[in-house]
Image (cartoon, rainbow, N blue to C red):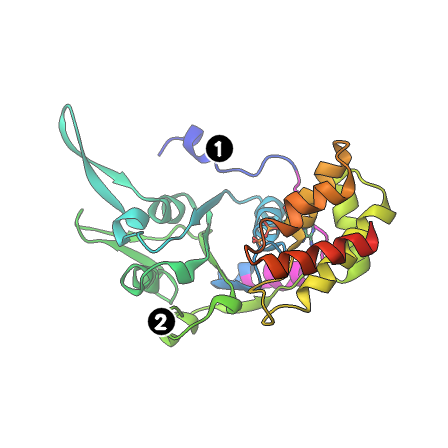
Amino acid sequence: MNVQNIEQYRVGAEPFYRVTAGEDALYEAAYARRMPVMLKGPTGCGKSRFVEYMAWKLGRPLITVACNEDMTASDLVGRYLLDKDGTVWQDGPLTTAARIGAICYLDEVVEARQDTTVVIHPLTDHRRQLPLDKKGELLEAHPDFQLVISYNPGYQSLMKDLKQSTKQRFAALDFDYPEAELEAEIVARETGVDSETAGKLVQVAHRTRNLKGHGLDEGISTRLLVYAGQMIAEGVEPVAACQMTLVTPLTDDPDMRQTLQAAVETFF
Ligand code: ADP
């Protein structure tokens, strides 16, 4: 692995992240002991942004993997590929992170099958090793390597949950949408809309978050509010902007869409 390859994983400029409850200090302490960390919370509430920010703050490269149910252990660890000279081994993202001392962020790890998830076990206990069985190599993780996973408790089901033997390898931080004033500040800062508009968007989101479990799987996320703010900042009329970014993505149910639309029209 040459230096150029490591550089591509560096977080260049400081990502904008507003600390909400001392999570940065807690994360730093966990990182000091290279403790695996799980970030729990609904989609679009700032988990990925937080990891980027912490990687930047700690000066570590960051390798992010979006997990899905078709992902195999080889997709994480690596595989032999055929090229003109025969077969060459290609490290997967987890192996690369363990070699170069990166923070490896497995986003939505619940999506991966359990036989895929177990490959992280030997990396997350005192061994800090990754067996590359097909290659016949036992990789000792770089001293700076750390594993971080995200997990959305809302999607939890009997079929799709992490095994206790996986869960209990991680310290965990709870994430949620920021409290109203702070969320409005984030939306204003991320999009350039004025604070009044940002405040109204947050109020729309709050209405929908109360509908979680009553016709909606999840309420409007901070990410969608940022989209709405961006559309408005582009000059789109607010009701149309909200329809495109807050109503239409969230649900296909006509009654629920009407309810969301009414919430938008209450504020805009
Ligand atoms: P997740 O990983 O939880 O799905 P993201 O980290 O992608 O969500 O967050 C979505 C968006 O929300 C970010 O792009 C950012 O604009 C905004 N955001 C959420 N929380 C914060 C925060 N505390 N500070 C700055 N931006 C935030």
Q: Which residue is drawn at the image coordinates 48% and 66% (left, top)?
A: 155
For the question of whether residue 16 can be seen, the reply is no
The residue tagged 1 is 7
Identify the residue shown where x is 43% and y is 49%: 66
Magenta stretch contains residue 15: yes
The answer to whether any part of residue 150 appears in the image is: yes
Residue 84 within the magenta-colored segment of the rendering: no
Marks 2/1 in contact by CB < 8 Å: the verdict is: no
Relative placement, left or right, of 124 versus 227 is: left
Mark 2 vs mark 1, foreground winner is 2
Classify residue 192 as left or right of residue 212: right
Q: Is mark 2 within 8 Å of ligand 1?
A: no
Q: Which residue, given by chain and number where applicable, does mark 2 sit on?
A: 159
Q: Residue 221's x, y, as percent? A: 64, 55
State the residue lying farthest toward the left: 86
Viewer-closest of 166 and 61: 166
Residue 7: x %, y % from top left: 48, 33
Q: Earlier in the sequence, mark 2 or mark 1?
A: 1
Front position in the image: 241 or 137: 241
Q: Dot 2: within a 10 Å radius of its alpha carbon, few (fewer than 14), some, or many (20 or more) residues?
A: few
Helix, strand or loop under label 2 = loop
Report the magenta residues as a range.
14-30
What residue lies at 76% left-to-right and 38% top-to-bottom?
Answer: 232
- The amino acid sitting under disc 1 is Glu
- Is the residue marked 1 within 8 Å of ligand 1, measured from its CB? no
> Where's residue 227, x and y in %?
67, 43
223 over 82 or under it: above or below: below
